[in-house]
Image (tube, rainbow, N blue to C red):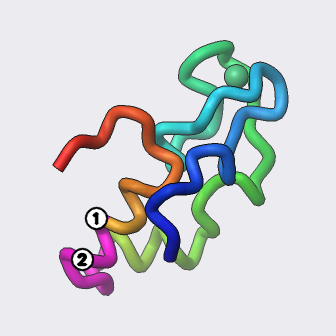
């Protein structure tokens, strides 16, 4: 998974990178986000169950995130 693709997940309304794909609305302009820009339901469930390794979590959080710093 690429860690340098900030534009992969962007708000369709304001084009800003989404820093938290678990949100249902854009954190900048408040536009409702299409489901395919957010985590899928099975993936969110898996995250909540802890099915991912710590590295997987970091990859997921870094991808498309503008405020994550290691
Ligand atoms: Zn927006």
Is residue 54 magenta-colored? yes
Q: Report the magenta stretch's main SS.
A: helix
In the rendered view, would you say 5 is above or below 13? below
Residue that carries the numbered disc 1 in the rendered image: 58
Residue under the image location 45 percent in, 73 percent down: 45
Where ligand 1 lies, by image quadrant?
A: top right
In the rendered view, would you say 20 is above or below 61? above
Q: How many marks?
A: 2
Report whether 4 appears left or right of 33. Answer: left
Query: Disc 1 versus disc 2: distance between alpha carbons?
Result: 5 Å
Q: Are marks 1 and 2 in contact (CB under 8 Å)?
A: yes
Q: Which of 25 and 63 is in front in this view?
A: 63
Residue under the image location 41 percent in, 79 percent down: 46
Label 1 crowding class (10 Å Cα cut-off): few <14, some 14-19, many 20+?
Answer: some
Q: Which of 47 and 9 is in front in this view?
A: 9
Disc 1 secondary structure class: helix
Report whether 19 appears left or right of 15. Answer: left
Which residue occupies the extreme top position in the image? 29
Residue under the image location 47 percent in, 42 percent down: 20
Q: Residue 25 carries which label?
A: none
Q: Give the range drawn in magenta.
A: 49-58
Is residue 38 magenta-colored? no
In the rendered view, would you say 35 is above or below 15? below
Picture coordinates of residue 59 (x, y %)? Answer: 37, 68
Residue that carries the numbered disc 2 in the rendered image: 55
Residue under the image location 32 percent in, 77 percent down: 56
Picture coordinates of residue 28 (x, y %)? Answer: 59, 16
**Image quadrant in which you'd find residue 15:** top right
Disc 2 secondary structure class: helix
């Amino acid at each position: 998974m690429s860690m340098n693709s900030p534009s992969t997940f962007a708000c369709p309304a304001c084009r800003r990178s989404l820093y938290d794909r678990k949100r249902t609305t854009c954190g900048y302009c408040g536009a409702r986000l299409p489901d395919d820009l957010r985590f899928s339901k099975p993936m969110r469930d898996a995250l909540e169950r802890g099915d991912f390794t710590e590295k997987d979590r970091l990859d997921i959080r870094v991808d498309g995130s503008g405020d994550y710093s290691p």
